[in-house]
Image (cartoon, helix red, strand yellow):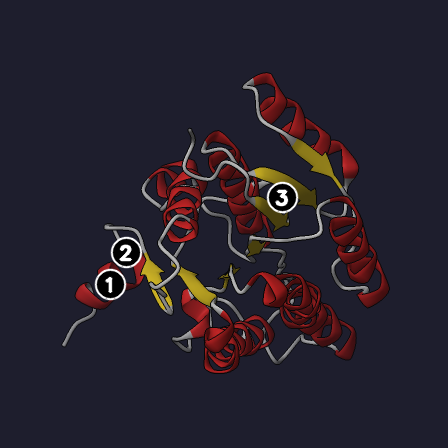
Amino acid sequence: MAALSGKIAWITGAGSGIGEAAALSLAEHGAEVILTGRRAAPLEDVAARIKAKGGTAHVQPADMMVASAVQAIGSFIAEKFGRLDILVNNAGLNIQPRRWAVLTPEGVDELVRGNLNSAFYAVTVALPLMRPQKDGVLIHTASMAGRNISMLSGAGYTAAKHGVVAMSHTINMEEGINGIRSCAVLPGEVATPILDKRPNPVSAEERARMVQSEDVGDLIRYVAMLPKHVTINEVWITPTHNRSYVAALNQKL
């Protein structure tokens, strides 16, 4: 029997990148997955690949920045399954005008709603489903920008991801007594479509040396499969060829 057989997993931002990789990995190991993202077509493609390999997937499109839409997904999960074992809280975004000189109130709203509000909304849906079963794991895609301050990711994204990391730790503080575990996954540079939003283009050669979506998906699967008495509170995953380290080495001291 597959290690995650009988487990219900909800993945947000599941249509591409890390969310897609996590959904495929969890389904491969037996989980029944709910796929959420803003666009139905990519979700349907991921679901089709899961089903082609004998897995079970349910497409539930939603804009995670809209609280009522997130609550509707929660109602679907509660009515169809009556439980939730794994949340991969992965939806997120960045924008190109990210420096203070060009950042607008509208950009701030998009960054905070897309990275922090959306993560909180998903948790408020997941916890009521997990508490009665005294079990469950929440895995949040944060970022190295959630621990380190740099100009690369921009002020809004950096602040929001710091919020996601703090949120995850507070879940463990309150919900560990209910058998619920929360893990903040902090990737460094990952070759995902979000790189297309960088103000400066990233070459194919540079992307090839980065962490790949499948690497993070496999890490998420590992965390999801840990025994109930184990919590990984926070984990970093970065490229061996770390461009920030290389840049520091090349500086003249």
Rendering coords of residue 108 (x, y %): 70, 76
Q: Nearer the viewer, residue 216 or 10?
A: 10
Q: Residue at x 36, y 37 (%)?
A: 208
Residue 144: horizontal and vertical position, in percent? 40, 66
Q: Residues within 10 Å of mark 3 (few under 14, many from 20)?
A: many
Mark 1 is surrounded, within 10 Å at the Cα level, by few (under 14), some (14 to 19) or many (20 or more) other residues, namely: few
**Please, is residue 123 above or below residue 72 in the view?**
below
Q: Quadrant of residue 6?
A: top right
Secondary structure, mark 3, is loop
* Residue under numbered circle 2: 242
Tag in front: 3 or 2: 3
Give the farthest residue toward the left. Answer: 253
Q: CA distance from mark 1 to mark 2?
A: 5 Å
101 or 161: nearer the viewer:
161
Location of residue 67 in the rendering, given as x and y in whole percent from the top left corner: 80, 67
Secondary element type, mark 1: helix
> What is the C-alpha distance between the residues marked 3 and 2?
26 Å
**Is any part of residue 15 visible from this angle?**
no
What residue appears at the point 65 percent right and 67 percent down from the top-left corner?
97
Q: Quadrant of residue 105?
A: bottom right
Mark closer to the chain start, 3 or 1: 3
Disc 2 marks which amino acid? Asn
Q: Are marks 1 and 2 in contact (CB under 8 Å)?
A: yes
Closest to the observer, 34 or 98? 34
Q: Is residue 16 above or below residue 220?
A: above
Q: Which residue is mark 3?
A: 14
What type is the residue that disc 3 sits on?
Answer: Ala
| Label number found at residue 245 | 1
At label 1, which amino acid type do we have?
A: Tyr
Q: If the image is split into quadrants, where does the N terminus sit?
A: top left
